[in-house]
């Protein structure tokens, strides 16, 4: 079998890119005949390295011009970087709009009613995470404080003091390092994290998120899935298949919760107790009456308070928590669907399938296939 030489035009100083490379490597290993070009001892090349290179395909941080120039030489190329203003059609990137939507719904589900977002280090296609956050909040009637500069982040205490409303504020930091700056600014300004300010980063780099106090919650993007899918696209292109009409966008995986956002931000003690009980009991077939007893109030009273504070019913809150648990298990385990359904409080697989599809728009098996990227 003839070997296929692949070049990776990536900056490994970026932790997201390193994880992308891991996904590429996994796909390449499955093929058996992929060899990664390493002119300097590591599979990392510069554009100057590629000028006289005559290999089979390139994956990397490639704008439209770079992709076009490689194609002119007969070399298929796939971009994995989302900060270009215009992405090449042969791109596989994280769905940035979904990042913003996920973050907004996460904070709303915690009962937070004041919101902020940082504007630093957001370029090109990545501005969609900004738009996704703002539009999701706007659709539900919420305003958002935009911290557009490092100085505004540094002065976060005074910025928040001028922002209308009471209670904690949820801050989406569009990159993990910016989230660290937010947390430090809060501490310097006398604000408590998470009691006054809940902070959520993006990328879930452990070095950035865990080597500080309090540790920072963050959105896990699934970079390895981006790499695997990019490698699959390159494989198809090298075999002569038609290039896609538009970039492929990979859904972010999950929110990894740490201390910086570990808060149930509702002033109503009964609702807070109910939410805690639901979160801790998502593996059991609990009913609304069980939740009301745990909160020490009548069912109708609890329903009314839920709708007033959270705009959802108790039953909907139970279902969402169950489905979130199911999503984690589908992505992280090989548990059979029948057993997984039972572990998420459903008595039959049929009821689980119906509830899961109603909430996510896809079947449990389809969801697992989408996130478990290995062939």
Image (tube, helix red, strand yellow):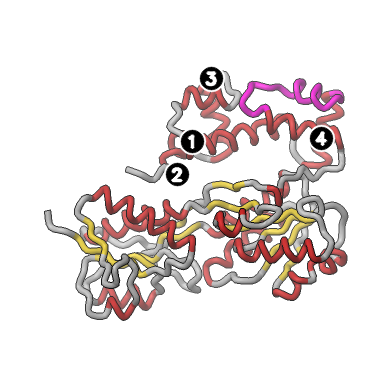
Q: Nearer the viewer, mark 2 or mark 3?
A: 2
Is 34 left, or right, of 16 in this rendering? left
Q: Which residues are magenta?
A: 281-298
The residue shown at (27%, 50%) is 29
Disc 2/disc 3 C-alpha distance (Å): 23 Å
Dot 4: element: helix
Would you call the spot at circle 3 few (<14 residues within 10 Å), some (14-19), or many (20 or more)?
A: few
Q: Earlier in the sequence, mark 3 or mark 4?
A: 4
Dot 3: element: loop
Where is mark 4, residue-wise? 271
Q: Earlier in the sequence, mark 2 or mark 4?
A: 4
Where is mark 1, residue-wise? 330
Q: Nearer the viewer, residue 202 or 144?
A: 202
Is 306 left, or right, of 338 in this rendering? right
Whether 237 is drawn above or below 119: the answer is: above
Where is mark 3, residue-wise? 348
Is 289 left, or right, of 123 in this rendering? right
Q: Farthest residue to the top: give it.
A: 347
Q: Earlier in the sequence, mark 4 or mark 1?
A: 4
On the image, the x and y values in percent for residue 10 come to: 39, 68
- Mark 4 and mark 1 in contact? Answer it, CB < 8 Å: no
Q: Is any part of residue 141 visible from this angle?
A: no
The residue shown at (52%, 53%) is 221
Where is mark 2, residue-wise? 371
Whether 172 is drawn above or below 270: the answer is: below
Q: Earlier in the sequence, mark 1 or mark 3?
A: 1
- Mark 1 and mark 2 in contact? Answer it, CB < 8 Å: yes
């Amino acid at each position: 079998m003839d070997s296929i030489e692949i070049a990776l035009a990536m900056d490994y100083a970026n932790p997201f890119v390193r994880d992308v490379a891991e996904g590429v490597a996994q796909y390449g290993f499955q093929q058996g005949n992929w060899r990664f070009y390493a002119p300097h001892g590591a599979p990392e090349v510069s554009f100057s390295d590629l000028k006289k290179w005559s290999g089979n395909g390139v994956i990397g941080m490639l704008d439209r011009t770079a992709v076009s120039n490689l194609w002119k030489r007969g070399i298929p190329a796939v971009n994995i970087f989302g900060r270009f203003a215009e992405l090449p059609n042969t791109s596989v990137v994280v769905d940035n709009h979904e990042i913003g939507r996920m973050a907004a719904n996460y904070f709303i589900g915690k009962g937070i009613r004041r919101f902020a977002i940082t504007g630093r280090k957001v370029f090109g296609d990545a501005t969609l995470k900004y738009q996704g956050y703002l539009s999701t909040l706007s659709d539900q009637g919420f305003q958002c404080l935009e911290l557009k500069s490092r100085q505004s982040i540094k002065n976060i205490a005074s910025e928040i003091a001028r922002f209308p409303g009471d209670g904690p504020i949820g801050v989406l930091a569009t990159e993990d390092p910016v989230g660290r700056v937010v947390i430090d600014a809060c501490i310097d300004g006398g604000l408590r994290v998470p009691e006054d300010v809940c902070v959520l980063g993006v990328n879930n780099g452990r070095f950035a998120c865990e080597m500080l106090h309090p540790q920072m919650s963050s959105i896990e993007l699934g970079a390895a899935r981006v790499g695997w899918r990019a490698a699959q696209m390159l494989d198809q292109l090298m075999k002569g298949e038609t290039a896609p009409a538009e970039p492929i966008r990979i859904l972010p995986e999950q929110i990894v919760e740490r201390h910086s956002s570990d808060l149930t931000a509702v002033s109503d003690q009964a609702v807070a107790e109910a939410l805690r009980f639901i979160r801790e009991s998502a593996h059991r077939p609990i009913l609304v009456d069980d939740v009301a007893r745990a909160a020490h109030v009548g069912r109708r009273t609890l329903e009314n308070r839920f709708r007033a504070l959270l705009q959802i019913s108790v039953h909907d809150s139970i279902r969402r928590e169950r489905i979130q648990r199911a999503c984690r298990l589908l992505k992280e385990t090989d548990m059979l669907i029948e057993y997984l359904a039972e572990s998420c409080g459903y008595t039959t697989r049929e009821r689980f399938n119906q509830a899961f599809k109603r909430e996510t728009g896809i079947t449990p098996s389809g969801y697992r296939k989408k996130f478990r990227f290995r062939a």
